[in-house]
Amino acid sequence: MAVTHATAKSGAVRRVSAALFRRPAAKLALLLGPPLLWMVLVYLTALSLLLVTSFWRLNELTSEIERVWGLRNFETLWGGSVYRTITLRTAGMAAAVTVTDLALAFPIAYYAARMATPRIRSALLLAVTLPLWSNYLIRVFSWRIITAGEGPLQSFLGVFGIHRSLAASNWAVWLTFCYLWLPFAILPVYAALERLPGSLLEASSDLGAKGWMTFRSVVVPLVFPGLAAASIFTFSLTLGDYITPTLVGKGFFIGNAIFNLVGLASNLPLAAAFAMVPVVIMAIYLTAARRLGAFEAL
Amino acid sequence: MRNVKALIAVAGMMALLAAACGEEEVTPPGGDGGPAVIDSIGPTEGALSLIAWPGYTQKAWVRPFEQETGCEVTVKYGNTSDEMVRFMRQQGGSLYDGVSASGDATNRLIAAGDVAAIDVEALFPEYAKVMESLRSPPHNTVDGLHYGVPYMWGPNFLMYNTDEVKQAPSSWDVVFEPGSPYDGKITAYDSPIYIADAAMYLMTHQPDLGITDPYELTQEQLDASVELLKTQAGMINKYWAVYTDEIDGFESGDMVIGTAWPVNQQYVAKVPVASVIPSEGVTGWADTWMMSSNAQNPNCMLKWMEYTLRPDIQTQVAEFYGATPSNTGSCAQLDADLGDAAAIYHCGDEEFLASVFLWKTPLSDCGDDRGNVCVDYATWTNAWTEIRGAG
């Protein structure tokens, strides 16, 4: 009984797989259909609606959205110095965090990929990913406690004679971001370094290159896609985050301004227009990365 | 090239879709004949869903209400007035039955038809004992119709750490003027409505501006207030939006002085704090329980209004929250329970209440003979973004 059942079942599976084998198009549709549907319906539609909304306007008297096309929101963004300040502050923070994280990630990734024993390597990678096991909010809150007045950070700085609370400052935001996104910087750089063939390094040294020369002309060009991938993570994550500045900082970032435009002012069109700013920044960033050949090895 | 065409086609489809979505217009509720006034309480529905300020719906008085009426209460806390307005409008106002709205939210809700008019005098006998000036205040009574019942009121006073601020300040200048001894350790309320605090300060210190009401500002008066707040921004440690932010800030020592609610002072434990009413006066708030015009459980909401008006309940809330009851029947109990400490409550004190500039929604109509030259809340909001974004 059980045997017949199993045969019947495997027979059906066999027929389906045979049918799919004869029709490669159907196979492809089954394979790509669901994710494509998701991409188009959820992701692209949302993005296009955002774009469309940014050209509408808010009637300030009734606080209702008027579906009239116009560039008024973009004029407000360009004309009001406050939005430029916020954009520059956010992009500046994203750049600072990216540079710091890459500088921190490279040595760690290099050690893990090329110097550590397998046992230490696994321990190190586990340590790097360990923070990701806990909730993001908990990590941000712990940095709020660390950076608060009379907190651990202030005592630590006191050792170096700096008697100053960094609570609610951009320094605190920078430290928190660097901590939060470090795993996302280490892992791509590690993956790139791991794939670096040792023979190339030996060849370089055989040809008389010193350590620095090898590093500059062999390691960096080969690892560049990994560095670019890491920088895309750290840069875009910082650009989009608004919870960290709210909890550990004081100044407004793009996300905070958008949150206020939606929550306080109910000005969805202007919020949508401002939300296009990070999209544009990321588009420029990705284009630049592509020009520099960051995606060639992917 | 084909890819580009496909992309354009997709984008075009999206635009069509968006246009189709845009068709459904929001019809203003109420209709032509003005809002209907609710004047009776029917059988209760067994459930009640509220939006409230944190601390307003503690188990101590919600549990007895549930036992008495059989209405299961669920509460969503609102941290700001703007958040409360947003919550009240969710799902066409059917998600929440009622809200403890402050005066800067109430008029927005009334104007948009989000809340129901109620014949409070007929329905709630306790209404006769409500403080005279809170019986038909402009923040919840429009065109002679009442849109809810008053709950607590209180001032936004000046709170300070008594270890750091040795002498009690007598003016708000310590938080506004450059060169304040507390530069970098000042806090302020993170909301557009806080502009009124600056405007109130300017009433005394720049009388030439001619500010008569801190919520009815002309563009010029608003600009002067914004200027003052931009100066202040450099001295602010952190703005507080949620009351626990200020409590945390005071306890860590990062903040030593700033505007506060009574509940904030109540819960600062690790450092000694005190509060004063500075010579320029204070802004304040008077909260109203309002019912959604699309409430799913209107009768439970009416029962809740009846319940929260009772003097014993209001005393209980006042003692827990540090705010002042609107029902004068609570005062005797408050005095008996607290003794001398009851003085800061100013219970039933019409004179004190009159000196408080209660939150209300700024409108372009100044409400006096100046006419429509004032700036509305949307302009205040933009100004607030300007102040906060620069800092």
Image: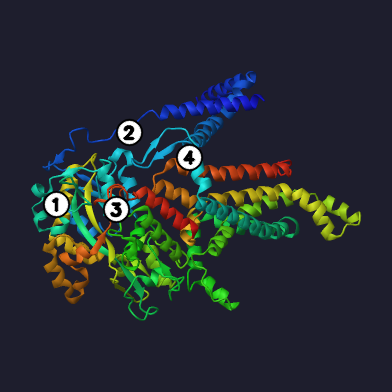
Q: Give the residue type at disc 4.
A: Arg
Tell me the chain of label 4.
A
Labels 2 and 3: the sequence-earlier one: 2
Q: At numbered mark 2, what does the secondary structure look like: helix, strand or loop?
A: loop
Q: Give the residue type at disc 1.
A: Glu
* Residue A275 locus on image (x, y percent): 51, 44
Quick check: can you spot residue A106?
Answer: yes
Labels 2 and 1: the sequence-earlier one: 2
Q: Is disc 1 in contact with disc 3, using a CB cutoff of under 8 Å?
A: no
Same chain? Circles 2 and 1: yes
Instruction: Determine the CA span between mark 1 and mark 3.
Output: 23 Å
Quadrant where the C terminus of chain A sits is top right
Tell me the chain of label 3.
B
Q: Which residue is mark 4?
A: A72
In this orientation, which residue lies closer to the viewer: A178 or A82? A82
Labels 1 and 3: the sequence-earlier one: 3
Same chain? Circles 2 and 3: yes
* Residue B273 locus on image (x, y percent): 33, 75
Same chain? Circles 1 and 3: yes
Instruction: Determine the CA span between mark 2 and mark 4.
Output: 23 Å
Quadrant for residue B336, please give it. Answer: bottom left
- The image's mark for residue B26 is 2
Left or right of B92 on screen, residue B230: right
Q: Which residue is mark 3?
A: B104
Mark 3: few/some/many CA within 10 Å (<14, 14-19, 20+): many
